[in-house]
């Protein structure tokens, strides 16, 4: 390749010149799935949460929540075998596990963890991360995370994940031996790749926009739900005021007293139900929040692709530069301005022996660079194939989950409205009997 030629496109195959990054997905590509889901072999649950006190890495006293993970082997019929295996994990350990999965499986849309602190809540709900109701919802979220990973065709077979489930100690050492820190790409490098990639894949660019829109829409939906919940809370408390007024009124009205007392009772029962209703709503909100955090998981896959493309483009440019240097040394002509060319003019040309040595070194480096470029193209092609199949799997899952959650939420709202109608129907009957 001469110095005037452009570097190859991302994930080109050297033999055919086929461009993969911006083209169609290669037919027949499959994400390695291995054996069947881990959930068909094990029962997995996060059964309870416990508040604990201990010392952190700075040797300072802290209060934290530990979660009990229970697993049990299943037989061919899906029935439990033997006793439960139990161990406790902190939220920070779940974070370590997910970080490891993100680094080790860059093409996978890794399931997100539940929020560490409450967000998008109605104002009467505590945002304290030690609040019992919040801890309970986070327990459910952590169980859902484990079930998501255990049912994933790739993640479920990872040894670090299985040791997280059944080894009280030692799994962190195994995680460190896997080289997690060495594999982690810096945020600065990711940002650099985003702005400096010359040939971005349109599909991944569109996926990034899609994830941004998904996050924006769900965030807006959660904020609206929180505002509606505040108003709903106020409406129910007004019914509580009706109940108090009717009860007080019944004490001074002998003829209407029984009817007013009964109507007040209906109002009180209705008003008292709001806390349970809005707590149930929070569970539906948590299902939406999961996909709010899934949006970041999608962007993480896009960033990994950009990093791979950036590294390949840099390797291609470096190869072009070395071939140009070799050509200049062989012909004795300098095609572009360089400090080296200026030095040669000022202090004389290199001897033939020196030139031959440098040409030989460059030829070896070119050979290594071409091999490296070939490997990067192959790795990139595999990444694109696996990532796109993974993204399609994620979208199918998202459509099913959100459809089910929104339908159940609508059914709950209809049921709640029917109860409200029934309360006023009962109150009407009480007033009619006065």
Image: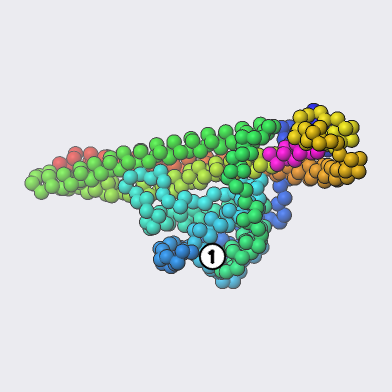
Residue at 48% over, 38% down: 218
Q: Please give left or right for residue 216 compared with residue 426 in the image.
A: right
The scheme the figure's colours follow is: rainbow
Residue at image mark 1: 70
The residue that appears at 57% across and 34% down in the rendered structure is 210
Front-most of residues 349 and 406: 349
Query: Which SS type dominates the magenta stretch?
Result: helix
Quadrant for the C terminus in the image: top left
Residue 208 appearing in the image: yes
**For the point 57% across and 54% down, which residue is it?**
98
Residue placed at 65% from the left, 53% from the top? 183
Residue lying farthest to the bottom in this orientation: 82
Q: Is residue 424 magenta?
A: no
Element type where label 1 sits in the image: strand
Q: Residue 390 placed where, x, y %?
A: 66, 44
The range drawn in magenta is 310-322
């Amino acid at each position: 390749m001469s110095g005037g030629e452009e570097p190859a496109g991302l994930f080109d195959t050297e033999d055919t010149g086929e461009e993969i990054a911006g083209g169609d997905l290669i037919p027949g590509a499959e994400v390695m799935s291995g054996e069947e889901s881990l959930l068909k072999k094990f029962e997995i649950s996060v059964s309870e949460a416990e508040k604990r006190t201990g010392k952190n890495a700075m040797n300072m006293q802290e209060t934290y929540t530990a979660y009990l993970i229970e697993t049990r082997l299943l037989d061919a019929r899906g029935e439990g075998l033997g006793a439960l295996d139990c161990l406790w994990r902190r939220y920070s350990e779940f974070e370590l596990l997910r970080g490891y999965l993100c680094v080790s499986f860059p093409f996978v849309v890794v399931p997100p963890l539940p929020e560490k602190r409450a967000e998008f809540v109605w104002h009467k709900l505590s945002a304290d991360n030690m609040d019992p109701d919040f801890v309970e919802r986070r327990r459910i979220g952590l169980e859902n995370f484990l079930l998501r990973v255990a049912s994933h065709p790739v993640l479920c077979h990872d040894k670090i994940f299985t040791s997280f489930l059944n080894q009280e100690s030692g799994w962190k050492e195994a995680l460190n031996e896997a080289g997690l820190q060495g594999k982690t790409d810096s945020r600065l490098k990711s940002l650099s790749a985003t702005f400096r990639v010359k040939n971005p894949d349109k599909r991944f660019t569109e996926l990034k926009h899609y994830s941004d829109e998904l996050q924006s829409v769900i965030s807006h939906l959660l904020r609206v739900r929180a505002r509606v919940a505040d108003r709903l809370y106020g409406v129910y408390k007004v019914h509580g005021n009706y109940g108090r007024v009717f009860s007080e009124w019944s004490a001074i009205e002998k003829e209407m007293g029984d009817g007013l007392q009964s109507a007040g009772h209906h109002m009180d029962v209705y008003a008292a139900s709001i806390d349970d209703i809005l707590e149930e709503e929070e569970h539906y909100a948590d299902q939406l929040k999961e996909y709010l955090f899934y949006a970041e998981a999608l962007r993480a896959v896009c960033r990994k692709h950009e990093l791979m493309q950036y590294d390949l483009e840099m390797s291609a440019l470096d190869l072009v530069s070395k071939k140009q240097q070799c050509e200049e040394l062989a012909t004795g002509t300098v095609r572009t301005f360089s400090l080296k060319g200026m030095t040669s003019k000022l202090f004389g040309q290199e001897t033939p022996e020196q030139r031959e040595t440098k040409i030989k070194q460059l030829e070896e480096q070119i050979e290594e660079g071409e091999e490296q470029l070939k490997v990067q193209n192959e790795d990139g092609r595999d990444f694109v194939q696996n990532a796109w199949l993974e993204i399609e799997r994620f979208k199918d899952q998202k459509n099913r989950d959100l459809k089910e959650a929104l339908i159940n939420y609508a059914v709950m709202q209809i049921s709640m409205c029917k109860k409200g109608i029934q309360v006023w129907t009962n109150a009407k009957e009480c007033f009619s009997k006065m």
